[in-house]
Image: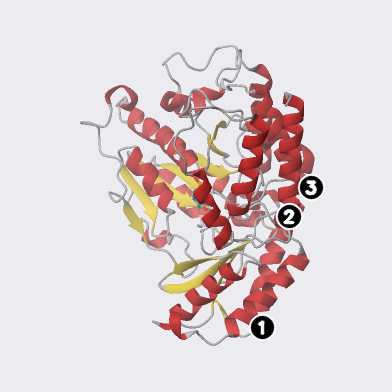
Amino acid sequence: MRTSELLHDAAGRAARYLTGLAERSVTPSAAAIEGLERLHEGLPTGGSAPEEVVAFLDEVVSPATLGIAGPRFFGFVMGGSLPVTLAANLLASAWDQNSAIHQVTPGTAELESVALGWLRELFGLPDDASGGFVTGATMANATALAAARHRVLADAGWDVEADGLFGAPPIQVVVGAEVHPTVRKSLGVLGLGRTRVHEVEVDAHGRMRPDRLPELRSPAILVLQAGNVNTGAFDPFPELVARAHEKGAWVHVDGAFGLWAAASPALRHLTAGMEEADSWSTDFHKWLNVPFDSGIALTRDPEAHAAAMAVSAAYLPSSGVRDPSNFTPELSRRARGVEVWTALKTLGSDGLTQLIERNVRQAQRFAEGLSQAGFEVLDEVVLNQVLVSFGSPEHTRAVVAALQEDGTCYCGPTVWQGRTAMRISVSSWATTDDDVERCLEVMIRLGRKPEPSAAAG
Ligand SMILES: *Cc1c(COP(=O)(O)O)cnc(C)c1O
């Protein structure tokens, strides 16, 4: 089969897969998962025809996927892919650009520069904020915190890139009690420790309490949150950032999905003050609805960012040309900015505002429908996250399991301040208001079912 036929065949299969998702069970069937047995063969000595390999993938693996790309997936804050970003991804894969250095791959490096400019404007960040296009918020947090580590230690007269942390002045790291577990992981990777942190108490919505902030002493890093993964709540930035800056601390904001509230005039008040921080991280594969994997680390200190990430000390070329790899942990890397540029170009800021506001309205409708049906919604819906209890922890877990088994939609379980709940995260371009009503009916029906004795234990 010629290259062009092979690609058309794959594109046709991809399109049929996506169309099929609208009616297929969101969770793969037991038969589809059993079918994965067919993958388990010894390393083939002889090759296979390319078209047969693609057909095999489609036949065996397509049915065994979770319907994340479909309209009724509400687990873990994951968007689908806007079709145009999938198309751009296909084209970019054909380009096969190693987007590390501008001079080598100018096209994709320029796309990233332009996308970075648009993002600064969208989030209200400084005109010269630096950005590293990375795999997601975990790596974005790690990258931004590496820049923070550089700056606070450089200010204390210590070169952490050259000398490491051995003998360095100890850094005071302060996080909220509801910090995302991936921030802890990033702190561990950076040698700052997953648990060697000061945890600040949070309020009933999961927001850091300014009255519980410890006395900060530099070198210090304060990690705040835009969008609590359970409630969507935002830390009170103005007071916290001002107090940290008085003491010379670096403030990082984990805004994996919450930063996108800044794209809506109606929701922007939630992010007020976050622009005064020193670094920010967000995901594109969540609310911007681009294919996995994609996120960004942004900082107001390009020098610290590049000092932490550039391969050699000869970073920041005087020409002002931006080399993507000066801001990322990777050297060789795919051109992640392509889909970001494509999504922003296609939606425009108006389209993005509509996407964000539609999902927020849909989350509010879930909360309204479930509480009208008599179930307890555990916190106010400020963004796109809904927490609902169907009764006892056992019953709530059983309802989540039954919902996943039913396959109309997908939600996961969570524990919120000691309470077991089902979490609904609305973050897909593909979700329609009809989808929401259809899912509500199923949730309410399953929620009202008496607890099956098998699940009672
Ligand atoms: C999802 C999420 C992360 C981790 O993002 P990945 O894209 O999975 O690496 C970090 N922080 C928050 C608040 C999140 O919601």
- Mark sitting earlier along the chain (2/1): 2
Please tell me which residue lies in front, 456 or 131. Answer: 456
Residue type of the residue flagged with mark 2? Gly
Residue type of the residue flagged with mark 3? Asp
Examine the image and state in which quarter residue 76 appears: bottom right
Measured from the top left, where is residue 252 in percent x and y?
A: 46, 44
Comparing labels 3 and 1, the label whose residue is closer to the camera = 1
- Dot 3 corresponds to which residue? 350
Please tell me which residue lies in front, 16 or 91. Answer: 16
- Dot 2 corresponds to which residue? 20
Comparing labels 2 and 1, the label whose residue is closer to the camera = 2
- Dot 1 corresponds to which residue? 372
Image quarter (top left, top right, bottom left or bottom right) of the C terminus: bottom left
Q: Is residue 30 above or below residue 168?
A: below
Query: What residue is shown at x 32% (from left), y 27% (from top)?
Result: 160
Q: Secondary structure at mark 1?
A: helix
Marks 2 and 1, how far apart at CA: 32 Å
Residue type of the residue flagged with mark 1? Gln
Measured from the top left, where is residue 98 in percent x and y?
A: 58, 21
Examine the image and state in which quarter residue 104 appears: top right
- Mark sitting earlier along the chain (2/3): 2
